[in-house]
Amino acid sequence: MADLTSNFIGIKSPNPFWLASAPPTDKEYNVRRAFEAGWGGVVWKTLGSEGPPVVNVNGPRYGAIYGADRRLLGLNNIELITDRPLQTNLREIKSVKRDYPDRALIVSLMVPCDEDSWKAILPLVEETGADGIELNFGCPHGMAERGMGSAVGQVPEYIEMVTRWCKQYTRMPVIVKLTPNITDIRRPAEAAKRGGADAVSLINTINSITSVDLDDFAPEPTIDGKGTHGGYCGPAVKPIALNMVAEIARNPETAGLPISGIGGVTTWRDAAEFMALGAGNVQVCTAAMTYGFKVVQEMISGLSDYMDRKGFTSTSELVGRAVPNVTDWQYLNLNYVTKAEINQDDCIKCGRCFAACEDTSHQAIAVSDDRVYSVKDEECVACNLCVDVCPVDCITMRKLDKGEVDPRTGETIGDYANWTTHPNNPSAAAAE
Amino acid sequence: MSTSQLTEGIVPGRLDPESYCSNFADHAPPLSAQEARIAADRCYFCHDAPCMEACPTTIDVPLFIRQIATGTPEAAAKTIFAQNILGGMCARVCPTENLCEGSCVRMDAEGEPVEIGALQRFATDTLMAKQSHPFARAERSGKSVAVVGAGPAGLACAHRLAMKGHEVTIYDAHAKPGGLNEYGIASYKAPGGFAQAEVDWLMQIGGIKLVENWQLGREGDGDLAELLGDFDAVFLGMGLSGVNALRLEGEDKDGIRPATEFIAELRQASDLAELPIGRDVVVIGGGMTAVDAAVQSKLLGALNVSLVYRRSRAEMPASTVEQEHALTHGVTIIENAAPIAIHGNGAVREVEFAYTKKGPDGLELTDATFRLRADQVFKAIGQTLGDMPAQVEIAGGKIKVDGTGRTSVERVWAGGDCTHAGEDLTVTAVSQGRDAAEEIHQFLMEG
């Protein structure tokens, strides 16, 4: 079994699977259960300043999007930061850390955007023995209306400023959690780096309304006939998160800045993908909220088996491995030509590829009277839609070799060539 | 209780009263909303779906299942009823394993089809439970049509014609409408008086008058010429009222009767405990009627029930699922054997069979014989057309029709089991009745 030990900005954990700051990490009881189940680390649910805690709504906090068989694909929430007294949380953090010294325990923080507030809370956290702090600049609901959470995360200057305070007033490692509710994720990451952050974590949840009650005409979750936008998470947000992680990983300004990947990690494979795109570890929430803490066991065995298969002896060999292959569209090889191929033995003749191609794409699939579906190479633009809609995964894309003629264009497959030199590109660099 | 399963002869009350209730309860209970949602999620929404092609009434299966999946079962029901107004009964009695479900692409993928029949029942039950009728009549045409037979073909034809604005009168020889739905299918397939409830619901379209206990050509009722005089068109859907004989000496002994008679009697019985059944029952035949008679004999408490078919099981008209249904209910299926003699003094005592083999000119009897103890014998070797008006051309023992259901007589159409077209299935009868109605409508509007 591969060694999954993780060292993220000096914080060690037996595996790279941390629970994200969220409802599952709000109390000692839950966190102990998580550690017993095998989680490598926990980011304690966000603490606020000393004083009367925030209050939560007393109606539903979550909205959901489902796939087939009511499988939860996306979840949104309007829960605020911890609504328990600061001292209670600090006491519990200390108790848990004492009993689980090998696990990572990070404390998420969100206090008003002034130096005194941050200066006040940092020593209290440090005293618990926690391994580090995560600055919650991401929550898009509720707290943002009070000038915290994503209201800070959307202003790079604030991020830099608060990060700097934290680095100044604590020796604990500082992770800055970024909001995706922004146009260019690289800017807040750069600001965090300038402020001295040890790492960034992303993504926090996305502004969202999951659904509308069509009888009451109100967004869900509905509180007494009204609804508000919540933070969206779960498998549905993974593609957005992967892209943002990759953008930071390949940005020269932030290259090398450690990243904790968050956003819809549900299986070992999701985790491996985040890590390949540059995340040093991952944080999980929705999968645990859907299935319970036991899911980490599949993540551990799956990642371990994968690393064994690949001959990786440490997670660091996986981290960032796909980053060099993330590029801009203009550099994609236009002489890479593929054609869909249907494996007739596996085809169940549902015809979804045909409907998709005929109605919405390039009319490149033929059907015979006895329902045999085949690809018309002379029409196939290799869009891949047939592969995506096939329920039994019986369609593959065959790469045409150099020297072969593409039946669609009549052109011979040549060497690598991209848009920057393409004759149709008005600003193409002149050929030699 | 003085009788038991061991009592010889044909006697009632072989079982305790509760057993009759459980034995004749719904054999395929309806899906719950949760089950329906899960089942609906399995549909791939195929292009040009094979299930739809396999349905004789061409119900848009992917669409209705998607409508269930999206929480609109009433819309799903309307999709079904638009093609098949008896979609409720068909959901219960169709041999779906040979039709829609047999062609489901999931059969190729994993050998388990989408539960189309059960989903169809879920949708149709939901709508029918609301007692609402999803169709309205068109503007009155002033035309009238006589429909002979209130079975699936006649009802489908009448409903479509009424919907098109014509006035319809249905004549039926029985005391109740429904045809085989009411008199001919196993009780546990449509319990709770579903057949009558379905007819009542169908009649909500309006414009249909029902005349019961009226037989075509019977003295005092009326004949085809009279109908043609009184109506603009006539549809014949009277089914098959006769049964084939074994053509053996002793066939008239006590205890021997057509399976259809037994099934009809059972369906109409108010107390199944009062229905007499033999201890040793022999059913001769290999179709759905034979299976229905055999299984219901068992359920009434018969000790030994044998179903004997002259050809192999693979050749039985009853589907594999039907055969398995019989086997799991304790019916013994004997294949490749034909009756050659009936023994008994006054009442049947034994039936003698000879094993058969395939010869150059068809089936041959071999010398190998055996006898089955029998105090009751049900004949289920096919049904025949009853007396027909002389002017109607017959082909192969059934009414000859063209592709549109037209008979040899001007202004007379026919459909269902009484015609030579298609398989003798409820769903086929519905499709023929419906299509004939469309043809009749076109004819009436042109004329």
Image: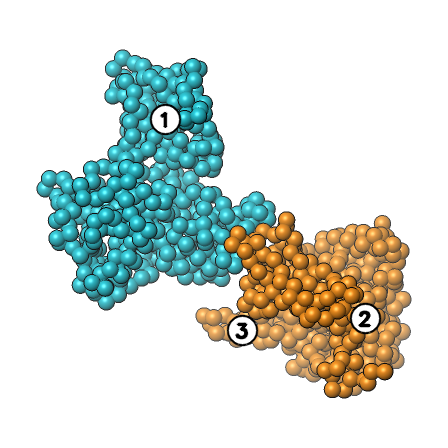
Is residue B446 shown left or right of residue A353?
Answer: left
Alpha carbons under labels 2 and 1: distance apart = 76 Å
Amino acid type, label 2: Asp
Residue depicted at 84% across the width and 62% down the height? A318
Name the one closer to the observer, B70 or B418: B418
Amino acid type, label 3: Pro
Mark carried by residue A219: 3
Q: Which residue corresponds to mark 1?
A: B284
Q: Is label 3 in a helix, a strand or a loop?
A: strand
Using a 10 Å C-alpha cutoff, classify the residue at mark 2 as few (fewer than 14 neighbours), some (14 to 19) or many (20 or more).
Answer: few
Is residue B291 shown left or right of residue A127?
Answer: left
Percent coordinates x, y for residue B99 in the rendering: 45, 46
The answer for which chain carries disc 2 is: A
Look at the numbered discs 3 and 1 and tell me whether their residues touch, using CB distance below 8 Å.
no
Q: Nearer the viewer, mark 2 or mark 1?
A: 2
Q: Which residue corresponds to mark 2?
A: A415
Residue B201 occupies which quadrant of the picture? bottom left
Percent coordinates x, y for residue B436 in the rendering: 29, 53
Q: Is label 2 in a helix, a strand or a loop?
A: loop
Per the rendering, the colour in which chain A appears is: orange
Q: Which chain is cyan?
A: B
Name the one closer to the observer, B100 or A95: B100
Amino acid type, label 1: Ile
